Image: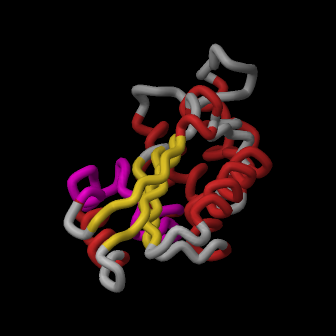
């Protein structure tokens, strides 16, 4: 199931989503982050970094939204039935029909499929050039501080409205980063 879902969804993922993907991972994410800082700080020897973390991501992923996203690419009834069974096997302490099963390899692809909605929004609609996601952690590097607060608030609203997830202000940070930091 993992391989099948991967073959269907991998081509749609952005290049700067690094968790649980072939030829990606945490070290490549860190190297890309350093590279983005270097690029963003060229003009003024400084840049700004926004970080966001989804609260209890794996327990609060909405199974119905995830299933609807999957149904946009998967049309085989048998495959959809298996996916529904995998999703319904997880019982979140947060709410009914929330969460994705941990410890199962499908949870990794489910996480990337679900948050690809956010990735596409941030890259295409918000036009954030220096955006990185690793699991439910988001980092965006800005050349200046002009739009950071607006971007953060827009992302928080987007995930709340479209993905039924929560990014509390306390789980975000904005830092000034000098060149080479």
Which residue is situated farthest in the bottom direction here? 43
Residue 62: x, y in percent? 70, 36
Can residue 140 be seen by looking at this rendering?
yes
Image location (x, y in percent) of residue 176: 39, 59
Residue 8 against residue 136 in the figure, above or below: below
Q: Position of residue 171 (x, y in %)?
A: 53, 37
88 over 80 or under it: above or below = above
> Is there any visible trace of residue 4 in the rendered image?
no
Question: In this picture, is 174 found above or below 55?
Answer: below
Q: Return the residue nearer the eye: 128 or 70.
A: 128
Residue 3 place in picture, x, y as percent: 41, 52
Which colour scheme appears in the figure? Answer: secondary structure
On screen, 69 above or below 44? above
Q: Is residue 99 left or right of residue 112?
A: right
Q: From which residue to which does the magenta span run? A: 9-30
Quadrant housing residue 83: top right
Quadrant housing the C terminus: bottom left
Total count of labels? 0
Question: Measuring 67% from the left and 62% from the top, which residue is drawn there?
Answer: 150
Tell me which residue sits at (46%, 62%) in the image: 140
Of residue 168 and residue 72, the one placed in the foreground of this image is 168
Q: Is residue 144 left or right of residue 78?
A: left
Q: Residue at x 68, y 18 (%)?
A: 94
Question: Which residue is at the front of the view, 57 or 180?
Answer: 180
Residue at image location 74% in from the left, 44% down from the top: 160
């Amino acid at each position: 199931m993992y391989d099948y879902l991967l073959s269907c969804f991998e081509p749609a993922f952005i290049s700067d989503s690094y968790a649980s993907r072939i030829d990606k991972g945490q070290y490549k994410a860190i190297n890309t982050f350093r590279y983005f800082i270097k690029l963003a700080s060229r003009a003024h020897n400084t840049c700004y970094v926004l970080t966001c973390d989804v609260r209890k991501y794996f327990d609060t992923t909405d199974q119905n939204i995830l299933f609807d996203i999957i149904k946009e690419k998967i049309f085989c009834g048998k495959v959809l039935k298996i996916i529904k069974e995998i999703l319904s096997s997880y019982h979140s302490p947060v709410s009914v029909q929330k969460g994705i099963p941990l410890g199962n390899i499908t949870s990794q692809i489910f996480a990337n499929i679900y948050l690809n909605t956010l990735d596409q929004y941030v890259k295409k609609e918000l036009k954030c050039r220096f955006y990185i996601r690793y699991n439910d952690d988001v980092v965006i590097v800005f050349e200046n501080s002009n739009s950071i607060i607006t971007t953060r608030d827009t992302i928080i609203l987007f995930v709340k409205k479209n993905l039924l997830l929560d990014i509390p202000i306390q789980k975000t940070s904005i830092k000034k980063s000098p060149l080479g930091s």
